[in-house]
Image: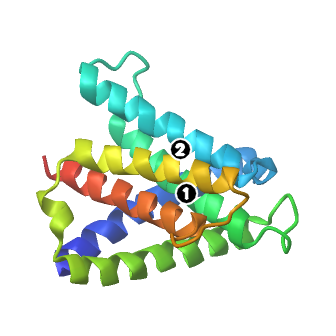
Amino acid sequence: MIQTSEQYSEIISNCREIFQKKTKDYGTAWRILRPSSLTDQIFIKAQRIRTIQETGQNRVGESVEDEFVAIINYCIMAIIQLMETNELEMELEEKLAFSLYDKYADFAFDLMTKKNHDYGEAWRDMRVSSLTDLILMKILRVKQIENNKGKTLISEGIDANYFDMLNYSVFALIHLNEN
């Protein structure tokens, strides 16, 4: 589990660095997006990964790893939009944006640690393609919950699905980095 924690932290650190650089380039323009729009962005990235996995062809040039990083960052943006929606200005100060990023990345790490313990690191025996499929399934679940105006009868909410997609993406990157 120590190795997983270190690998996880290294990946999130890389994702945060990209988030920081893009924030310096673009500000927090992503704040204009509704969570449903971010869900669609995550879908586009996951669908591209699946297409590359199935065809073996990558015509755009951005790597599968880059797409998993984007999913992680879009998930954190979506969680911020979902959880902090009424309390924030449209354009966030960089310090606040990074603080919120860290808050939800830390929450995702804590969740991963708990689930990883209970599931005995089962993800290590999974294929990256299966993790991709799980992300796509979670996206479809989120879309259905969004269509139901956020209401569920028995299931986890939208935020739990974003956290799972984030963590599946980290696991996929660990696999890809090990190969």
Badge 1 element: helix
Q: Of 145 and 132, which appears nearest the observer? A: 145
**Residue 140: numbered disc:** none
Give the side of residue 101 with respect to residue 167, left or right.
Answer: right
Point out the residue furthest to the front here.
153
Q: In this figure, which residue is indicated by the disc labeled 2?
A: 42
Residue shown at 24% from the left, 57% from the top: 174
Give the side of residue 32 with respect to residue 161, left or right.
Answer: right
Q: In this figure, which residue is indicated by the disc labeled 1?
A: 75
* Mark 1: amino acid: Cys
Spot occupied by residue 135 in the image (x, y as percentages of width and height)? 40, 50
Q: Can residue 63 be seen in this view?
A: no
Badge 2 element: helix
Q: Of 74 and 149, which appears nearest the observer? A: 149
> Cβ–Cβ below 8 Å for labels 1 and 2?
yes
Count of picture labels: 2
* Mark 2: amino acid: Ile
Spot occupied by residue 42 in the image (x, y as percentages of width and height)? 53, 44
